[in-house]
Structure formats: C-alpha cells, structure tokens
Image (spheres, rainbow, N blue to C red):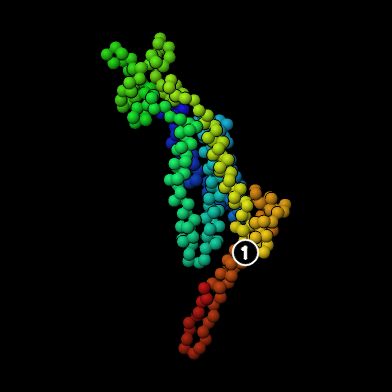
C-alpha cells in the first residue's frame, strides 16, 4: 500500500524463514547446558521489542531489521520451549504434551482478524487507485488519444489529469500518490503491536517461579507472590535459586528405568525392569 507492487515483500519475509532454518543448530550448540528459561526470557523480550525498528523506520530497511531481530528472538525461545515441554511430559506422553502446547494455533484466525482490522485503521487502503485484483493503476495508457491510468490487467477509469500537473501526467504507484487517499500513521500500529507483545514476556516472568518448579503451594503460592533480587532479575532470565522440581522427576524416572532386578530362580533367566 505504501511502497507499491515492486517492493520485495517475500524476500523480506524470507529473512525469518531462512533464519529459523539455519540458526537453531548454531544457537543450540552455543547454549548447551543452559537452563531453558535463561534462554527463553531474553528470546521473548527480543522478539516482543522487535516492532520498534519498523515503528521508528517505516520503510524497507526498517522492515528488514524488524525481521532480523524478530528471527533472533524466535530462534532463542522457540526450541527451548519445546525442550521445556518435553521435560514436563511423562515418558511415552511427549507427543500429547507437544500437541497440547501447539493448541494455541487454533486462535490464529482470530489474530488475523484483529491484525486486519488494525491494518485497515492505521494503514488504510486506496481502492480508488487500484483495480479489482489489487494492482495499482500505475501504467499510463493512450487510448484513442485519451490518457488514462491502467493496471497490468484492466483499465481503472482513472485519468492522470486528476492526479497533478497536466503537463506531467503521472499515475499512482502507491497509496501515497493516490489523490483520494487519507493519510494515516502506520508507526502507531507498530507501537501498539509492540506494547501487546511485551505482555507475553511479562506474563511468563510473573509465573516464572511456578513454571520452573522447585516450590510448593505454601512458598508464596509456588513462588509467584515472592519478591527478591533474584526474582526481579528473572525478568531477563536469571536462574532461580530453587532447584527445579522437574529435575527430581527426571532423576527419579532415570533411576527407575535403570533399576533392574534379576530373577535367579533355577531355570529362570528373566530380568524384570521397572519403568
């Protein structure tokens, strides 16, 4: 709408695609042995704050920086979320836990509706300067001695004399050049998106002691209602002092899976394995 049909929109979007394809193994190798939420929290903050770049620079360069920063945040938190989910699942039920964790995708269409409404409000379309297929009427055509603006598919019924100086006939290549378009502030949209995005790492931080485990209900409601320097630093992923209760669960399961009892009755060579 603002930069025309020749903007490399899919090339810009591919930054995230290729980043999520190439970077996770590198990040995984560099963060091996680090507790999950020490990586998840910085990743969530980086991804949530990434819209600030396109809000400050609403152009192609700002969009590229936004995609790059968003991708860095995503490759930090997303694999570790899967790791954390797997640590919670009992042996043999990992698939169910992964499926339940992915159930948020059911709300995807709702997010699309909200994003579309916000886009229409803060980055309005210019239907008068586009054909029914969405192409801009950006090509100047001389039909029977009459100059008019046409798209790549059809005539738009738009005449260049209504767009500016008659001596230099031009046709709109973006909504910014459309005479009937009402200017809007797209930066406001990205600022609002960033504010809503920040709610995610804040919510995770509020419940972080509970998510990490190692506390009971009497310990400040699983640590959620406690406040300390370490608790505050947890907003950036600082490790909790309490040992994760999931560590005990995994250790117990590991012990059970390795504990073998031999049946040494005569003629019997069976081993019973406790799982």
Identify the residue shown where x is 44% and y is 21%. Answer: 177
In the rendered view, tell whether residue 148 sits above or below residue 69: above
Identify the residue shown where x is 69% and y is 58%. Answer: 241
In the shown orientation, is residue 96 left or right of residue 160? right
Picture quadrant of residue 147: top left
Q: Position of residue 6 (x, y in %)?
A: 42, 28
In the rendered view, tell whether residue 265 sits above or below residue 145: below
Q: Position of residue 97 (x, y in %)?
A: 49, 60
Residue 96 appears in the figure: yes
Frontmost residue, 151 versus 250: 151
Q: Secondary structure at mark 1?
A: helix
Identify the residue shown where x is 56% and y is 39%. Answer: 194
Picture quadrant of residue 84: bottom right
Q: Position of residue 106 (x, y in %)?
A: 44, 51
The number of discs equals: 1
For the N terminus, the quadrant is: top left
In the rendered view, tell whether residue 190 sits above or below residue 203: above
Residue 13 appears in the figure: no
Q: Which residue is mark 1?
A: 245
Q: Residues within 10 Å of mark 1 (few under 14, many from 20)?
A: some
Which residue occupies the extreme bottom position in the image? 266
Q: Position of residue 166 (x, y in %)?
A: 40, 11
């Amino acid at each position: 709408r603002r930069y025309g049909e020749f903007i490399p929109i899919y090339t810009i979007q591919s930054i995230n695609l290729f980043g999520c394809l190439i970077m996770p193994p590198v990040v995984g190798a560099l963060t091996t042995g680090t507790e999950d939420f020490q990586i998840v929290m910085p990743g969530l903050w980086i991804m949530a704050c990434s819209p600030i770049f396109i809000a400050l620079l609403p152009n192609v360069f700002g969009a590229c920086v936004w995609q790059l920063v968003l991708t860095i945040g995503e490759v930090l938190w997303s694999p570790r979320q899967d790791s954390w989910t797997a640590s919670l699942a009992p042996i043999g039920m990992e698939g169910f836990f992964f499926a339940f964790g992915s159930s948020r995708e059911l709300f995807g269409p709702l997010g699309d509706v909200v994003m579309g409404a916000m886009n229409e409000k803060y980055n309005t379309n210019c239907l008068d300067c586009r054909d029914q297929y969405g192409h801009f009427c950006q090509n100047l055509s001389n039909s029977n001695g009459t100059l008019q603006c046409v798209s790549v598919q059809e005539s738009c019924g738009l005449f260049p004399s209504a767009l500016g100086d008659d001596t230099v006939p031009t046709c709109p290549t973006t909504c910014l050049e459309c005479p009937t378009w009402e200017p809007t502030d797209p930066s406001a949209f990205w600022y609002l998106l960033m504010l809503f995005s920040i709610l995610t790492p804040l919510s995770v931080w509020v419940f972080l002691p509970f998510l990490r485990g190692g506390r009971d209900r009497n310990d400040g409601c699983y640590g959620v209602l406690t406040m300390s320097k370490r608790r505050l630093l947890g907003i950036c992923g600082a490790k909790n002092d309490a040992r994760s209760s999931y560590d005990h669960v995994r250790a117990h399961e590991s012990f059970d899976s390795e504990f073998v009892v031999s049946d040494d009755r005569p003629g019997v060579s069976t081993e019973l394995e406790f799982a």
